[in-house]
Amino acid sequence: MKQRDSAPTMKDVAREAGVALGTVSKVFNDIPVGEDYRKRVEEAARRLGYQVNSYARGLKTNRTCSVALILPDITHPFFSALAQGVCSALAARGYRTILSITAYDPEAEQKCIQMVRQNKVDGIIGLTYNPELDIDPRLPYVSIDRYFSPSVPCVASDNFGGGQLAAEKLLELGCTRPLFLRIGSRVPGESDKRGDGFESVFRQRGMVCAALRLNDEDGLEPIRDFLAGHMGGGRLDFDGIFCVNDALAVRVRNFLTALGLRVPEDVQLIGFDGLRHFATGDFYCSTIVQPVGRLAETGVDMLLREDRSNLPSLVCLPVTYAPGGTTKE
């Protein structure tokens, strides 16, 4: 094939495919044409090495083929796994991801919302911590794990069901003195339902379930002190602990070890998230596993749906239990 002196144009593609220039334009701008025409244009573009100018197409269609993903942090394994899932799901649909790390800053989260109003992205998927976040109901926006209102679709794991699953597993493994531990944001979110689900199982059985709920600014010392204060005769008052996430479960395991207790022989422990060691792929602890891939896929699907008028306000995806060495399987 003769080497070209310049990049191929749409006219070159039309000539190669044997179709009108307008047909090529329709194909590249996702306007319906006959299947035969579409294939001829795409094959001609491949042969010539033609690349669609996404920026120019965006100017014509008022679309950027870009979606903003708002996350508070990227060092946490759950957030990084979610980012990977969203990026992959968007790329499969021909979209780019603009990642915005806000460090839990409410103002930074609100600035990201402005990007859509300025037509810099086609929509936003956000896992945010700003309770006053101003979201225009006409804005293409999907929230992850935080319900705002019926007009803002939210995708989350079944947090309440996950808490119930943890309780049922501890009961199955012989625990009779349960404890729920939580440390997290002051901003209400779907993850708050984990403890509610856990406690509901014991309440239905007429059993007492202790709980300690703290905010991030309280730090971990109160949990260490709480556990130490419930030691007597070399035994902890609790034999089964459910932590709001795996990160807390790992720290609690260290606290228990420092108190001379064995996990899982003396105390069984379950976390939430399904985080795995980077090197081995093993779970950090026995855990309720979030379907991170499905969270990402569902969020992207809801955001890019042509007709968003009938989107559900909240989609809860099922979770599963996985043993990870901190329970007596």
Image (spheres, rainbow, N blue to C red):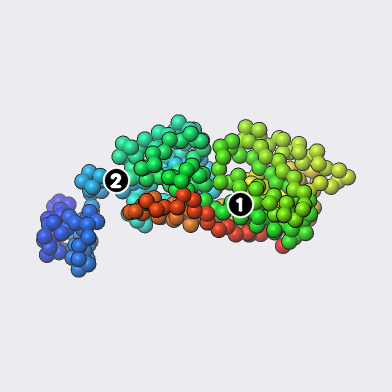
Residue 4 visible here = no
Quarter of the image containing the C terminus? bottom right
Taking the spot 66% from the left edge, 34% from the top edge, the residue there is 219
Front-most of residues 234 and 22: 22
Mark 2 lies on residue: 64
Toward the bottom, the furthest residue is 36
- Which quadrant of the figure has residue 187? top right
| Residue type indicated by callout 2 | Thr
Looking at the image, residue 89 sits to the left or right of residue 1; the answer is right
Q: Secondary structure at mark 2?
A: loop
Observer-side mark, 1 or 2, equals 1
- Which quadrant of the figure has residue 110? top left
Mark 1 lies on residue: 160
Q: Position of residue 93 (x, y in %)?
A: 35, 56
Q: Is residue 106 above or below residue 230?
A: above
Q: Position of residue 53 (x, y in %)?
A: 23, 49
Front-most of residues 93 and 180: 180
Toward the right, the furthest residue is 233
Label 1 Cα crowd, 10 Å radius (few <14 / some 14-19 / many 20+): many
As measured in the structure, the alpha-carbon distance from the residue carrying label 1 to the one carrying label 2 is 38 Å
Taking the spot 70% from the left edge, 46% from the top edge, the residue there is 180
Q: Position of residue 260 (x, y in %)?
A: 81, 46
Q: Secondary structure at mark 1?
A: helix
| Residue type indicated by callout 1 | Phe
Quarter of the image containing the N terminus? bottom left
